[in-house]
Image (spheres, rainbow, N blue to C red):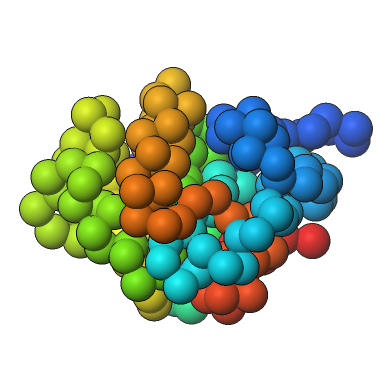
Amino acid sequence: MTPEPLTAWSPADGVTLRSPFEHRFRDAGATIERRGAWRIPATVAGDAGRLTSVAFGDGSHVAKIEIRGAQRPAPDFDLEVLDVAPGRWIALTPWERRDAVMEDLGAGNRLVLDMTGAWGVLVVVGAERDRLLRRLGPIAAVPGAGPVAGVPGRVTRRGDALWVLVAVEFAQHVWDVTADVAAGLGGGPAGVDTIVTHTDDPLLRIS
């Protein structure tokens, strides 16, 4: 029997969604703007200059969909698929595409779950990105899973950017450690707009 896909939760009018990193970015001087249902750190003073070393931005507004059963979904330019376990994956897609992607992924004897609120995402760019990752923890391979700042995390690579996923309960700790390591490499936090301009990644765009 084919399971029915779960209906995606959608925020009611007036509800604002916030990243688990918002307070840290705001304290770092980020300009916070509302885009769609989300508040995002759009810019951080001086962030463009950090791109030559290492900069990390907030990708938590990207939809994160857990898939179980059937075959591995095919990735696309706006759909990143991370392996979790046999028959289990996490798909990343733009927030505006979430409902349509969940409907598509729910076909073919799959169970789909919206896990956007469970994961925070940092997107790391710049020449020192791999060195920063090595200093955060012993990730054996990318894409893969392992300790990030001493807590469980998952890492994937899109173009020249590293995407670091951590559970929201660890998000502010991971931000603190990442900021300390980045500062030692001459880098620091960056706004979403700066990261999007640098990577031209459709997953991060939000209007």
Identify the residue at image location x=35%, y=48%: 184
Q: How many marks?
A: 0
| Residue 11: percent from left, percent from top | 76, 34
Horizontal side of residue 95 vs 122, given as left or right: right
| Residue 10: percent from left, percent from top | 72, 38
Q: Residue furthest top?
A: 169
Question: Looking at the rendering, in which quadrant would you find the N terminus?
Answer: top left
| Residue 193: percent from left, percent from top | 69, 64
Identify the residue at image location x=23%, y=59%: 131
Q: Depth check: 91 or 100 in front?
A: 91
Horizontal side of residue 172 vs 162, given as left or right: right
Identify the residue at image location x=45%, y=56%: 187
The image quadrant that residue 18 belongs to is top right
Identify the residue at image location x=42%, y=47%: 183
The image quadrant that residue 49 belongs to is bottom right
Horizontal side of residue 68 vs 25, given as left or right: left
- Residue 138 visible somewhere in the drawing: yes
Q: Is residue 114 above or below residue 150?
A: below
Q: Depth check: 121 or 181 in front?
A: 181
Q: Is residue 78 above or below residue 25?
A: below
| Residue 35: percent from left, percent from top | 80, 51
- Residue 7 visible somewhere in the drawing: no
Question: Looking at the rendering, in which quadrant would you find the C terminus?
Answer: bottom right
Q: Depth check: 9 or 129 in front?
A: 129
